[in-house]
Structures are given as structure tokens and as C-alpha cells.
Amino acid sequence: MSDEIDYDISSLIKVYNDGRVERFGGTDVVPSSLDSETGVQSTDVVISAETGLSARLYIPKTTINTATQKLPLLVYFHGGAFCMESAYSPTYHNYLNSLVGLSNIVVVSVNYRLAPENPIPIAYDDSWAALKWVASHFEGKGTSEWLNTKADLERVFFAGDSAGANIANNMAIRVGISKEKLSFRLEGIVLVHPYFMGEQVIGEEANRPQIKALLQAFWLLACPSSTKGLDDPFINPAEDLNLERLGCGRVLVCVAERDFVKDRGLYYIELLRKSGWRGAVEVMEAKGEDHVFHLLNLTSENAIAMVNKIVSFIFHQHTNV
């Protein structure tokens, strides 16, 4: 076992010469449960025993013991720079309990494999495999009775924060361009503080080069095979020639005033509007907040406002904040 370190990124993750990976956060897990505070029920499913791909499903209190009308389905991709966190961490479990409790929707939280052990594009491939699994429930014949009976696959949304928002965007593009058509209707995507980058310096990046260097280091760790660095289409939508074929009609982008990637989120909106995509895009900015603030304090005024905005977006109430 070698103690020689190949990567040491901001005391968040270390990669040793022998391939060992040491993470300093996001490794805790909590079991699925009936949440006493929200009444939300969760359960875990294995999507692929071969790869280890899995997910955590959430249903609201209103549907647990009743045959109610089917509810919108949100497929959620967690953040963590493609290298950290999981669908089973307390951070995401608590957040999705709160979101489902307030919104009355069904959620599939995808537990894709992490880099660097599983370099990109594995996270994207896992996410696509999870979407195909979701689509297998279209006629009520899938392996999850929850999705068969409670999820409306004519009203599907993708969402995620940071790297998860990046995945949500790339999955929506893949829905739009793939010859492999999925048996559900993607209505919209919600990108919260999306992890987009680019070699060209924009906005506040000129004043905070150390943070851009950190995000670049994470990207190169997650995607070592990329020949374009931060101009890889996966991380830089300006380089993605398929952006106009985004496979949904509505997009909500949430940004935070003090977040380093705020300018990238706003630039994404500009790119989308200029691309030829014919959908509608909305934006919400949280004043005085930083990256993924809502995960750190679920009951803050701005966090609750964001949940309310996501709910109104899903249920098609148009507003810009």
C-alpha cells in the first residue's frame, strides 16, 4: 500500500499512487425510512447488479396507503463534483424528504458511480441506464411497484445540483438526440447552481482564479481522458453543438448571488436562448447566498423560496424571480 499521493484537492479528496481514494466528506449514509417529520416514505432499489447502479425512491405521505392520481416524477442527480456524495448521504436524503413533503411528487434519486475510480463518462452512462429503468415502468410493468402505480411518466422532470445539474442537462440533451427513445415524456429540467466551466474566463472568474483552479482540478480528476479540458462539451455547454436539441420544453436555472459558478449558470441561459432551442427558460437568483446553500440549511428563507419555485415550475406556474 503506497502513501505516495497523486492528487490532493483542497483537503476534500486524496488519490494515492496505488489507486486508493480517500474522501473527507460525503461518505456517510442513512437508511431509507418513513420520515417522521414529513411523512415521506423512501426505499432503495438495485437497477443493475452488474455495475452496482442503484437509486433511492421517495413517495409523499398522501400516496403511501391510497390509490391516488399519479404524481409528477422527478429524477434527481446529486452533486459532489462527480467524485463525492451519494444518493444515500444525509445531505441528499434530508433534502429530498423535504422537497417531496412540500411538493407532493415522486422522486428517483440516482446513485451513479463516482470518479476517479469510475471516470467520466461512467456517471453519464449510469444516469442514462437509470433513465431507461424508469422508462421500463411506462405501462406499469416495471420492477418497482411504486413507479408502476404512483408515478406519471407523462410528467417527468430531471433535476440536480452542481455536478448533478450538469448531469441533468447532459441527460436532457441525450433524450433529445438519442436514437434510443425512452418511454416517458420529459417536460422540464431544474438546474441548481450548475457545475459548468470553460477555458475562457468570464465574470467573477477573473477575481477568483483559485476557485476556478479547484473546479478545473476536480474536472480533470473526474475526466482524465478529455482532450479539451474545460472546453469539453460535457462541462462547457458553449462547446456542445447539440444544446439546441435539448429534449424538453422548459428549463429552470437556480443561481446564488455569491456562488462562483453563478456566471456560468447565467451564461448557460444566454447560450440556450441563442441556440435555436424553442422552449421556455426561467431563472431564480438567491440573494446573499453561496453554492448549494439550500442543502446546508433546509429551513432558511431562501431555501424554502427555492423549493416553492421548483414546485411552481413542476406544476407549470410561470414566474421569474
Image (tube, rainbow, N blue to C red):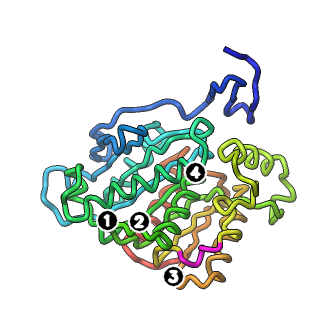
Please state which of the two labelled residues, at mark 1 or mark 3, is closer to the viewer. 3
Tag 1 and tag 2, C-beta contact below 8 Å: yes
Label 4: which secondary element: loop
Q: CA distance from mark 3 to mark 4?
A: 27 Å
Horizontal side of residue 116 vs 310, given as left or right: right
Please state which of the two labelled residues, at mark 3 or mark 4, is closer to the viewer. 4
**Residues packed near mark 1 inside 10 Å, few (<14), some (14 to 19) or many (20 plus):** many
Q: Amino acid at mark 3?
A: Gly
Report the magenta stretch's main SS.
helix
Tag 4 and tag 1, C-beta contact below 8 Å: no
Give coordinates of residue 12: x percent, y percent: 68, 33
Horizontal side of residue 77 vs 98, given as left or right: right
Q: Amino acid at mark 1?
A: Pro
Task: Give the label on residue 279, or none.
Answer: 3
Q: CA distance from mark 1 to mark 2?
A: 8 Å
Image point 23% across, 49% down: which residue?
Answer: 143
Image point 70% across, 58% down: which residue?
Answer: 261
Segment colored magenta? 241-245
Q: Amino acid at mark 4?
A: Pro
Task: Give the label on residue 157, or none.
Answer: 2
Q: Which residue extends farthest top?
A: 1
Q: CA distance from mark 1 to mark 3?
A: 19 Å
Residue bearing mark 4: 121
Q: Earlier in the sequence, mark 1 or mark 2?
A: 1
Image point 75% across, 44% down: which residue?
Answer: 217
Please state which of the two labelled residues, at mark 4 or mark 1, is closer to the viewer. 4
Compare residues 315 and 143 and report the one nearer the observer: 143
